[in-house]
């Protein structure tokens, strides 16, 4: 039977970043991905890179295209009822963020893994993980050609996203899954139009939230708060533009219009699985936890997880020292809860709860204004938004 030191299920941000970091320390891994390379590289997701994430890309040789093409932003606008306030992120924290959508991030890491001789098995479904409580787990998988294979490994990493079946192995034992549902969702569009403005606008209005983001000089990404049960056909172009202008326009800035070529409803969910390990099975990224998109923390949290997991695995495999690996969950979970809190807090200030009354709207606006009118408040929001440095461990 073939053997690989680390078997990684899922070619998303957690799996690919982990595989890349392991390679940098001479540890071999295989990434198993059920989708095709094209599907992975074309799935539209959010994409704000915190300073720590973009530093990791730069420092480990994956940042070249991002440096050349991504917008680097030093501030965001928060707009209440058509009145924007700029939060100068860089002035307040010394850090900036990059607008680099998740699929672009994935393209960079796939290209780098392949260039470095790494193995990513696309269109390959893992059917079973066995023996993770013992010394040598095995993975049974079906290759692109439909051939079943088995491989042995030292460690299995489930990085296969929010519907990971491996999480259940932990929660059916002593683990827990904490969840929160939100009474709203986002309606996301891609549009051929010039930028509304370079920096993002997070806008709130009695009718709800809108986000003005961007993908390039000619393609823009806009979101509107909608009902979780809304379907794409309930949002005509006319309704979209009317609501975007109502919620996000100000005296100086009007949302730019153009041909809408993609519409989708994004569900809002928070969930955390604890612990993120059982025996030689580890969860990373969305397989363990999901955040709503408001704080744009999803990808960054996945990268934070594997910043602990990678050195832990390297120490365990190269030095037979499992101390850091054993501490993975306790080191990763506090950051996850802080990101949950930030995403929840931003979401609750910016979104209208369906049927909310005058009291609820004005209290929400007052909470936001209290933050925006205080330097300490702005600094707090900015620190959370740009994110703390990634955990760093010697290997
Ligand atoms: C995006 O551009 O898709 C985006 C930006 C910021 C967010 C969420 C999504 O908070």
Image (cartoon, rainbow, N blue to C red):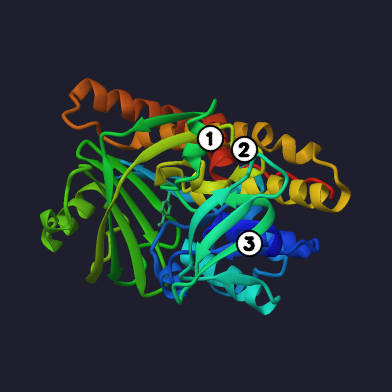
Q: Closer to us: mark 3 or mark 2?
A: 3
Q: Earlier in the sequence, mark 1 or mark 2?
A: 1
Please report the residue visible at 35 percent of the width from the left and 56 percent of the height from the top.
212
> Whole-Å distance between the Cαs marked 1 and 3?
22 Å
**Residue 249 vertical placement versus 207 (above, below):** below
> Which numbered marker is on residue 295?
none
How many numbered marks are there? Answer: 3
The N terminus - image quarter? bottom right
Q: Which residue is mark 2?
A: 277
| Left or right of residue 233, residue 117 in this image | right
Q: Are the residues at dot 1 and dot 2 in contact (C-beta closer than 8 Å)?
A: yes
| Left or right of residue 107, residue 60 in this image | right
Q: Earlier in the sequence, mark 3 or mark 2?
A: 3
Q: Which residue is mark 3?
A: 151
> Whole-Å distance between the Cαs marked 3 and 2?
21 Å
| Secondary structure beneath label 3 | strand
* Residue 90 in sight: yes
Residue 335, percent across and down?
A: 60, 36
Q: Which residue is mark 1?
A: 170
Quarter occupied by residue 242: bottom left
């Amino acid at each position: 039977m073939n053997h690989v030191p680390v078997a990684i299920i899922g070619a998303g941000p957690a799996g690919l970043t982990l595989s890349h970091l392991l390679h940098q320390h001479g540890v071999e891994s295989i990434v198993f991905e059920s989708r095709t390379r094209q599907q992975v590289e074309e799935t539209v997701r959010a994409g704000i890179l915190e300073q720590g994430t973009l530093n990791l890309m730069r420092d480990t040789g994956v940042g070249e295209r991002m440096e050349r093409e991504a917008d680097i932003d030093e501030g965001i606008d928060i707009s209440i009822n058509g009145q924007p306030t700029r939060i100068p992120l860089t002035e307040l924290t010394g850090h900036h963020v990059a607008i680099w959508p998740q699929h672009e991030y994935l393209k960079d890491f796939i290209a780098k893994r392949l260039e470095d001789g790494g193995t990513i098995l696309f269109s390959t479904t893992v059917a079973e993980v066995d023996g993770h409580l013992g010394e040598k787990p095995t993975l049974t998988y079906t290759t692109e050609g439909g051939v079943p294979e088995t491989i042995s490994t030292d460690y299995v990493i489930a990085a296969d996203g929010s519907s990971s079946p491996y999480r259940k192995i932990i929660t059916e034992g002593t683990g827990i899954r904490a969840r929160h549902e939100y009474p709203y969702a986002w309606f996301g569009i891609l549009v051929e139009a010039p930028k509304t403005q370079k920096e993002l606008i997070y806008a709130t209005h009695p009718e709800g939230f809108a986000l003005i983001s961007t993908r390039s000089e000619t393609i823009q990404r806009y979101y509107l708060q909608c009902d979780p049960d809304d379907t794409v056909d309930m949002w005509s172009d006319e309704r979209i533009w009317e609501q975007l202008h109502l919620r996000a326009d100000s005296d100086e800035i009007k949302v730019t219009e153009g041909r809408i070529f993609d519409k989708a409803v994004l569900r809002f969910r928070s969930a955390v699985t604890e612990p993120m390990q059982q025996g030689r099975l580890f969860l990373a990224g969305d397989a363990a936890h999901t955040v709503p998109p408001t704080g744009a923390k999803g990808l960054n949290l996945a990268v934070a997880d594997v910043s602990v997991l990678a050195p832990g695995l390297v120490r365990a495999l190269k030095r037979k020292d499992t101390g850091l690996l054993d501490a993975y969950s306790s080191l990763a979970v506090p950051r996850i809860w802080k990101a949950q809190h930030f995403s929840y807090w931003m979401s609750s200030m910016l979104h209208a709860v369906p049927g909310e009354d005058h009291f609820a709207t004005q209290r929400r606006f007052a909470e936001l204004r209290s933050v925006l009118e205080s330097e300490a408040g702005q600094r707090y929001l900015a620190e959370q938004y740009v994110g703390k440095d990634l955990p760093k461990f010697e290997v």
